[in-house]
Amino acid sequence: MSVIRVAIVEDQLQTRNMLVSLVSDSIHFDCIAAYGHSAEAIHQIPLLEVDVVLMDIHMAGELSGIECVKTLKKVCPDLPFVMCTSFEDTENIFNALKAGAVGYITKSTPPNKILEAIVDAKNGGAPMNSQIARKVINHFFVAQQVSENTELNKLSVREQEILKLLSKGYRYKEIAAKLFVSIETVRKHIHNIYEKLQVSSRTEAINKVFSAN
C-alpha cells in the first residue's frame, strides 16, 4: 500500500497532537499538515498534495468544520474529508455529509479504527462508527414512515429531533445534554415547535404530530 498523506484540522491542541502522532507513527501514513484554525486550513490545504483530511466540527470562534469542508470542496472536489468529532447528533451528521464529508467518526474511536477510516476514505469508501451508521439508517427509516406527515414536515430536522425526544419523556436538561446544546437553545426550539404547530403544550404537540402519522 502506498503512503497515504493526511491533513488534520482540530482546534484542541492535545487532540491534534494525539492524531498527528497516531498518523505519523503508523506505517503507510504520513501527516503532512495539522491546523488549529479553519481559516488556515482553507488557505493551505488546496496547496498541498493530500489524500485525506480528518476534520473536527467544533472550531471555537471561527468557521465550523462543516463550513470548512463546504468551502474546501469547492476548490478540492475530489478530496475526501472524514469528520472526527465528539458530536453524534443527527443534525451534525447530516449537515457534515451534505457539506461533502465522506465519513463521520467519533473521537472515542479506537486508534486502529481511525486509521482504517482513513484508508477506507482514500479507497472511495464512506467510513462511519457503527452507532453513526445506525443513526443514518434510522433517519431514513423514520423519514420514510413520516413522509406523509404534513405536521411533522413543518418542523426543521432539529425541531423534529427534539419533539421525538420529548415524546420519549426526556426533560429539557436531558435533551440539551444529549444534543450538546444549552437548555435555552432547547427552549427556543420548543417555542418554535409550538408556534409552527399552533399548540400550547408538549402533550398537544406530540399528539398533533404523531396522531397524524
Image (tube, helix red, strand yellow):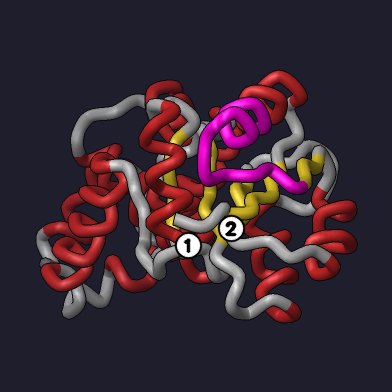
Residue 28 among those drawn in magenta? yes
Q: Is residue 197 above or below residue 200?
A: below
SS of the residue at dot 1? helix
Q: Is residue 50 above or below residue 181?
A: below
Callout 2, which amino acid? Answer: Val
209 to the left or right of 155 = left
Whether residue 151 can be seen here: yes
The one of 120 and 39 positioned closer to us in this rendering: 120
SS of the residue at dot 2? strand
* Tag 2 residue: 52
Name which residue lies at 88% across and 52% down: 40
Of pointers 2 and 1, the one earlier in the residue sequence: 2
Residue 19: x %, y % from top left: 61, 31
Q: Is residue 113 above or below residue 9?
A: above
Whether residue 194 can be seen here: no
150 to the left or right of 159 = left
23 to the left or right of 72 = left
Extent of the magenta region:
20-32
Residue 38 among those drawn in magenta? no
Locate the N terminus and report the quarter of the image it occupies: bottom left
Locate the C terminus and report the quarter of the image it occupies: bottom left
Name which residue lies at 72% across and 60% down: 68
Name which residue lies at 53% across and 49% down: 83
Residue at mark 2 to residue at mark 1: CA–CA distance: 6 Å
Q: How many marks?
A: 2
> Label 1 crowding class (10 Å Cα cut-off): few <14, some 14-19, many 20+?
many
* Cβ atoms at labels 2 and 1 below 8 Å apart: yes
Q: Quadrant of residue 23?
A: top right
* Tag 1 residue: 122
